[in-house]
Amino acid sequence: MPGTRGATFHRPSAGAWCNPRDERQRLTDPAHNCHPASPNELSAVLGFTYNFENQHTDYQNGVDMHLDWGASKFLTKQWQVGLVGYVYQQISADSGSGNRVGSFESRVIGVGPQLGYVFPIDNKYQGYLNLKGYKEFDADHRAEGWNTWLTFSISAAPAKQP
């Protein structure tokens, strides 16, 4: 998108599905945080981004909507493989007196593989490393190609099973 972005407000909505191995796990883990005890994961996040007008350029990007999804399987308690994707669609026109290119509503779709690895940090925490690659297509008013994401997160370690 052209111009420098001003402040951005982002509000995602999320949902996930796991395939728990037993009824006790289903009741205590309502598929919000899938973990290696559940080998299958399907998750999606729908988000909208509102951008405030950039006071230096008098340009305001339109509102965009994006749906990010992932489907994966834990091969072991630590290794995960799967597919990921997203659909990005700008749903309102760019505006402001600095807008010299018109509505410039953009879109793109991306799909690709992911590989994840869960590892213990200590008795209380675990780390998660994830590598995703997206091949973009059906782009309009934006670049198209490959992009790759490497993410790292730390979370509480799961409780020890009796």
Image: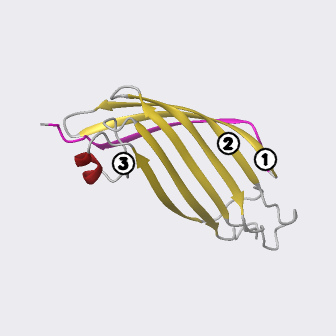
Residue 110, numbered label:
2
Instruction: Name which residue lies at 51% across and 40% down.
Output: 71
- Tag 2, which secondary structure? strand
Instruction: Name which residue lies at 16% across and 37% down.
Output: 161
Query: Residue 1 at x, y = what percent?
Result: 75, 55
In the image, what residue type sits under mark 3? Asn
Query: Which stretch did the figure color magenta?
Result: 142-161
Tell which of 74 and 136 is nearer to you.
74
View extreme (bottom): residue: 97
Can you tell which quarter of the image residue 49 is in? bottom right
Can you say whether 123 is above or below 105 in the image?
Answer: above
Left or right: where 10 falls relative to 28: right
In the image, what residue type sits under mark 2? Gly
Left or right: where 68 falls relative to 162: right
Instruction: Name which residue lies at 22% across and 48% down.
Output: 24
Can you say whether 78 is above or below 67 in the image?
Answer: above
Tell which of 56 and 83 is nearer to you.
83
Badge 1 or badge 3: first in the primary sequence = 3
Give neighbour class at mark 3: few <14, some 14-19, many 20+ (Cα, 10 Å): few
Alpha-carbon span between mark 1 and mark 3: 32 Å
Give neighbour class at mark 2: few <14, some 14-19, many 20+ (Cα, 10 Å): many
Badge 1 or badge 2: first in the primary sequence = 2
Say which of marks 1 and 3 sits in front. Answer: 3
Q: Which residue was labeled with disc 1?
A: 139
Can you say whether 1 is above or below 103 in the image?
Answer: above
Q: Which residue was labeled with disc 3?
A: 33
In the image, what residue type sits under mark 1? Ala
Instruction: Name which residue lies at 34% across and 40% down.
Output: 35
- Tag 3, which secondary structure? loop
Does the magenta run of residues contain 154? yes
- Tag 1, which secondary structure? strand
